[in-house]
Image (cartoon, coloured by chain):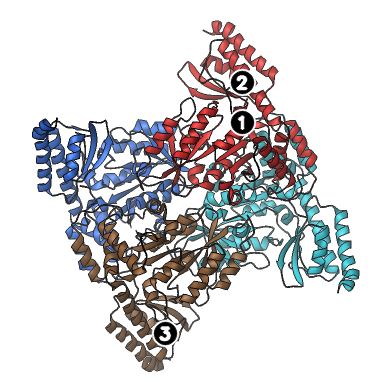
Chain colours: A cyan, B red, C brown, D blue
Amino acid sequence: MDDYSEGAHPQILEALLRTNSTQQVAYGNDEYSDAARQFIRDKIGCTDDEADIFFVPSGTSANLISIASCLRPYEAVITLDSGHIACKEAGAIEATGHKLILVPAVNGKMTPKLLQKAVRSNQFYPHMAKPRLLYLSNASETGTVYTKRELTELSALCKQLNLLLLMDGARLGTALCSNKNDMTLRDVHELTDIFWIGGTKAGALLGEAIVVKKALAEGFVFHLKQHGALLAKGRIMGVQFLELFRSDLFFELATHANRMAQKISAGFELLGYKLLAETETNQVFVILPQQLIRRLQDRFRFYIWEELDDDLAVIRIVTSWATDEMQVDKFNAWVQQWTVVCKEIEV
Amino acid sequence: MDDYSEGAHPQILEALLRTNSTQQVAYGNDEYSDAARQFIRDKIGCTDDEADIFFVPSGTSANLISIASCLRPYEAVITLDSGHIACKEAGAIEATGHKLILVPAVNGKMTPKLLQKAVRSNQFYPHMAKPRLLYLSNASETGTVYTKRELTELSALCKQLNLLLLMDGARLGTALCSNKNDMTLRDVHELTDIFWIGGTKAGALLGEAIVVKKALAEGFVFHLKQHGALLAKGRIMGVQFLELFRSDLFFELATHANRMAQKISAGFELLGYKLLAETETNQVFVILPQQLIRRLQDRFRFYIWEELDDDLAVIRIVTSWATDEMQVDKFNAWVQQWTVVCKEIEV
Amino acid sequence: MDDYSEGAHPQILEALLRTNSTQQVAYGNDEYSDAARQFIRDKIGCTDDEADIFFVPSGTSANLISIASCLRPYEAVITLDSGHIACKEAGAIEATGHKLILVPAVNGKMTPKLLQKAVRSNQFYPHMAKPRLLYLSNASETGTVYTKRELTELSALCKQLNLLLLMDGARLGTALCSNKNDMTLRDVHELTDIFWIGGTKAGALLGEAIVVKKALAEGFVFHLKQHGALLAKGRIMGVQFLELFRSDLFFELATHANRMAQKISAGFELLGYKLLAETETNQVFVILPQQLIRRLQDRFRFYIWEELDDDLAVIRIVTSWATDEMQVDKFNAWVQQWTVVCKEIEV
Amino acid sequence: MDDYSEGAHPQILEALLRTNSTQQVAYGNDEYSDAARQFIRDKIGCTDDEADIFFVPSGTSANLISIASCLRPYEAVITLDSGHIACKEAGAIEATGHKLILVPAVNGKMTPKLLQKAVRSNQFYPHMAKPRLLYLSNASETGTVYTKRELTELSALCKQLNLLLLMDGARLGTALCSNKNDMTLRDVHELTDIFWIGGTKAGALLGEAIVVKKALAEGFVFHLKQHGALLAKGRIMGVQFLELFRSDLFFELATHANRMAQKISAGFELLGYKLLAETETNQVFVILPQQLIRRLQDRFRFYIWEELDDDLAVIRIVTSWATDEMQVDKFNAWVQQWTVVCKEIEV
C-alpha cells in the first residue's frame, strides 16, 4: 500500500489514449499543457499575469529546479530535518550548490519560532551561507497539514525575514482535502512564492505542476531544460493534468485516499493502538507490536518507519486513489482478529 | 513533421493500459523494468554482469547523468561543436561542472584526426581541464551514421588516449536500421563505455535506456535520484521499453521512419534539389528556394535549419514511426507540382 | 586577541625578504616549495611515495579542495554540526555539490558512536546521499584535541565503514603541542587520508599545507587550479612553510600560544570562573559576568561566543605566537582586580 | 623572463615589514585594505557609492568569483577562444556551472561583429544557454590593448544586447601604460560592470583587486568566502595594493615593463625578425629560427608559444617591473651577434 504503486487513474489513461495521435508542438507548448495550465489557474483563481506553470517529471526535479531558479550561489534553504529535500533526495539540492539549514519538526511542521531561531543563528556574515528560502511540505512528511493561520504566520515571517517560501506539494491534494484543512489553492498561491502540485501521487503516471509567481518565473524554462526536465513530448504531463483539473478529479481522488486512511486509522484506534501522529491525510503512522507487524507483512505491503524497541515499531500505511475499500475492510478485520484472538494465543 | 510530435505507438499505449492496475515496487525496481532490461540485454547479447541498464525521462537527463557519473571535477568532454550537449541542452553539462572541448564536424561526425588534435591541444597541465570523455551521437545531428570501422577506430583511439566513450543514442534506432549501418547493438556496446537507446523519438511517450558498462555502474542510481530522473512510477518507462524490445518493434518503427525519409529525399533529388547531407536515417536536410519553403509552410510543419541567402535555405524534415506514407506521397507530389508548374508562374 | 590579527612571525618575513629576488618557476614548482615539502615530509617521517603536499592560500580552500578531490557527486561528508565547514565557510562544501551530514559534538569532538549512528541513519538507498568522508578538526572548534586512542578508533571505524578521513588542521600546531596530545605528525598522517597543516594561524601570512596520501593525489593540482588556489608566485607559501619547518619554529610558536592560553585559563580558574571546556590548546572559553565582559571589551579584543543569560556569557580568547606574556599578565591582573574589588562596588 | 618569476617589488616588501606587527581586523576589514580601496577609488575617480572593491589571491579566483556572482545558472559567458578562462583555468568557470561561448580573436581582441554573431547564434530558446556576460582581457592574451573607441563600442553593444561586461585585468597596468592606450581607469570603470586590477603580475606577491559596480556588489563577500578567497589576514593584500596605489608605483612598474618589451621588440625588428603581433605591452611574440631559439634557451628563460615548422617557432618573452635593462641589452646583443655572425657559421 503506497501512493505510487499503481499506474494511473483509468480516466487519465483514457485521456492519453484519446489524444495520442494528434500532432503537437514539443517541449511543453502543446495544446493540452496550455489547457491544463488554464484549468489549474482557474482552480487557483489567478490570471496569466500572476503565475507561470511548469510541468516536470518528478518531485525531486520540482524541488531542485524551484530552488536553483531563485537562489544565488551563497544562499541557503531552511528545511525541517525530516524534509524530503533533506533526507530523501540524495543530496539533490546540495548538488545544485545550496546549503540546507536543518530544523527539527513540531508535529511534522515548521513553526515561526523555529524559523526565527534558524535565521538568527545563521547570521555570522559572511562566514555563514545566507538563509533565503523556507521549504515546507504540505501535507508534511508525517501526513499533517498546515492550517491557514499557521501558513499565514510563516508567510508573514518569511516576508519580514526576506525569505522566499517554497511549498512541496507532492501530497498537496490530500492536504487540501483533509478534514483539518481550511485553505484553498488560492490561499496556497498567495502565501507562497513557489508551490507545486503533485501529480504522481495523485493518480497520474508522472508529473508535478510547479506554480511560480510571475516575478520569479523569468528564465524558469531554462532551468527545466538544463536539468533534463523539459520533456520533448511534454503533452504526456499536459494531458494528465488537464484530466485531473478539467473537473474535480484531482480533489475527488485525494478525498478518497484520505477517507481510506481515516478508516484504517479509526480501526487501529478502536483497538487501542496508538498513532504516532493524528491521521490528517492519506498516511497512517501507527505503533504496533512487532508480532502483529510480522503477521501483517505476510499479507500486506507497508513501510516500517521506525523500530521503537524489541516489542514495538511504527509502521507507515499510505492510501491512494486506488485503495480499494474492500481491502481496507479486510485489513481492519484482520488486525482486529489478531488483536482480539491471536494475540492471546501468541503470548 | 518531427519525431516527437505524436504521442506513443498504439502498441505501447496498449501495454500501459494492460499493466496499469498491478501493484509494483517503485523507483525502477518493478517487474516491467526488469523484464525490459532483460530483453535489451538479450538484443545486445550481453549478460547481467556486463552492463547495467537505467531508464531516464529525457535525453538531456541521459547525457548529463552519464557524464556526471564518470568524470572527476576537472575532467572535460570532447564533443562536436554541433553536438546536442554543446548547443541544445542549455548548458546542462557545464551545470554539472564539466568543460566541453569543441571540435568541428566532418559530415556530421567525429574523426580520429580531429579527436587526436583536440586531445593534443588540451595538455597544458594543470592549466587546462583534462580531456577524459568523447561524446558522440549516432545517428549524428545531421542524420549520418557511424560505420563499424569508424567507431572501431575512434574506440581504439579513446582507449589509447585514456578517454571514455559515450554514445548519445537519441536516434540510435534509425542509425542501426540505416542502409549505411553495419553495426549491431553488440558492436555499439563493445565499442563504447556508456551508450543510451532513445525511446522518446522511437515511439515511446518518454524514456531513454542508458546502458552502462559494469565497471562504471556503481552508484549510478544515486545520480539518477540526485538529478530528479528516478521516477517513482518507473514502470512507465519499463513497460514502454519492454514493448519496444520484447519483439522487434523498436527496429521496425525505425525502419519505417528511415524509409519515409528516403522517399522524401529521393523525391527532392529527382527534382534536382540538393541535399545538405546524404539521407542516411530519418532526417532530410534539403536546400530549397525560399519561395517553395513559404508555400510548404502553409501546408506542412518542418524546421528551417539555416538561411543560406535571400533565395535559398536548408530545411530539416524529420520522419518517424508515425509518418503516414500517404502524406509523404502527397508532400512529394506537392513539391513536384510547385517545381514543375508554379515555379514558372511565380517567377 | 586572535590568532590571525597580526602579520607574520618576523623570521618568516625575513625569509621572504631574503629570497625575494631569485627567479623561480611558477605555480608551486619553485625551489622553496620543494624544500618546504621535503622538510614537512621529514617531520612526518614519510617518503615522496607516501604523500603529496600542496599549498593553498586559505583554510576554506584546503577544505573544499580536499573534499571535492575525493568524493563522487552523490557522496556526503559527515561533520560535527560545529565543524568549520558546517558553519563558518558560507556553504563552500555544498557549493562543490556535496551534502553535509551533521552530528552533535561531545566535548567538541566526534565519537565512534556518533559516527556509527550517522552512517546507519543515512543508508536509505538511493534516496540518501552516501556517507563517504569524515571531517574532523584537530584542535577542535572548541580547542580540544584528539588523543591517539580516539583518532585510532575513529580511523579504524572509517576503514570499516568505507569512509575517508580528512583532518582540518587550521590549528594542528597547537593540537600537537598540547599537554593533552600524544600523537606525532606521523600518527596523524597514518590515521587520516588527507590532513592539512595550518600556516595562517601558526605565524605565516597565509598558507595551508595539504598532505594527501598518494592514492588520492592524482589530479589534485587540477583542483587547486580550478578553484583559484594555485598561486602564480607559489613561492610565497613555499618560503613560509620552509621557514616554519626547516627548524622547529612551527612547534615553538604553537607551544608559546598554548602556554599563554594556559596562563589566562589558570588565571580565570583561580578566581573561580568556570571554563566551558578545558583549555587544551590556544583557545580559552570562559563563562564570565556580562559586567566584567563589558569592562574587558574597553581594553581587550575577544569574541563573545554565546550569551547564556542576562548575567552571563561565554567569551573566547585566542592566543597566538604573537601574544605578549606581559599583556597576558596585565589581562590577568585586570580581571583579578575587577573580580576582587570592583565587583563589590558594582553590585 | 616572466612577470611572475620574482617575488615582490622591494617597496612592497618593505611595507609588509613596516606594518607587520599592528593588530588588525581580519577578513579584509583591516585599515590597510580600507586605505588601499580608497586610493584605488581615488585613481579611478569614483566614490564609495559607485563601486565596491575586493581583494582575492589569484586571477582565477577573480574571474570565477566575478562570473559566479552575477550570472544565473543558465546564463553563459562569451569569451575569445584564447581567453584565459577558456584555456588556462582548468575549467574553473564551468566548475561554477556556466557555459562558455567561444569566439575567435581578431588581433587578440573581441570585435562588435564577433560579439553580435555569438549572441545571435545562441538564441534557440530554451535549448541554448543564454548569453549574458562578455569576458575580455586587457591587455589581451597576445599583449594587445583595447582603445577607448573599441571598448566604448563593445560596451554599448553589451548594453544593447543585455550583456554584462567583465574585464580581466591581470595585465591591466601594462595596458593602461601602453603607447597604444587612450583610456583612463575611470574609462575602464565606466565601460565595464566588473573589472579587476592585477597585482600579482604588477609587482605584488599576490593579489588582484576586483572593482564591482555597486549594483552587482551585494553579497559579493559571500562569494569570496565560499570560494576560499577571503583570506583571514586580508591585510597581506591590502598592504600591497596600498603601496601600489598610494603613489604611482603601480603605473611606474608597468611603464618600465612596457619599455623593456619595446626594447626587446625593437631589437628583433631591427634584425629583420617578424613579430606575431605588434608589441603593445609587456609581451613580445616573435618568430625566430629554431636554431636561435635553442641557443637562447641555454641562456634565458622564455616560453615557446607555437611551433610553426621545423625551422621556425614563435616565442613569448614577458618583461616585468623586475626586468633589468642591462639584461635586456645583453639579450639584444646576444641575438644580434648570433644573427650576424653565428648564423653564417651554423648554416
Which chain hosts label 2?
B
State which tag comes first along the sequence, 2 or 1: 1
Q: Residue at x 54, y 10 (%)?
A: B272
In which quadrant is the N terminus of chain B drawn?
A: top right
Q: Nearer the viewer, mark 1 or mark 3?
A: 1
Q: Nearer the viewer, mark 2 or mark 3?
A: 2
Residue B323 vs B64, above or below: the answer is: above
A281 relative position to C251: left or right: right
**Marks 1 and 3, how far apart at CA:** 83 Å
Q: Amino acid at mark 3?
A: Gln
Q: Which of the 4 image quarters holds residue C175? A: bottom left
**Residue B294 x %, y %:** 56, 18
Which chain hosts label 1?
B
Residue B49 vs C238, above or below: the answer is: above
**Marks 2 and 1, how far apart at CA:** 22 Å
Q: Is residue D98 visible?
A: yes
Q: Amino acid at mark 2?
A: Ala
**Residue B271 x %, y %:** 56, 10
The local secondary structure at tag 3 comes to helix
Closer-to-camera residue (B222/D18): B222
Same chain for the residues at labels 1 and 3, yes or no?
no
- Say the numbered circle drawn on residue B261: 2
- Say the numbered circle drawn on residue C291: 3
Q: Give the crowd class for mark 1: few <14, some 14-19, many >=20 residues within 10 Å.
A: some
Q: Which residue is mark 1?
A: B184
A119 relative position to D114: left or right: right
- Say the numbered circle drawn on residue D213: none
**Marks 2 and 3, how far apart at CA:** 87 Å
Q: Nearer the viewer, mark 2 or mark 1?
A: 1
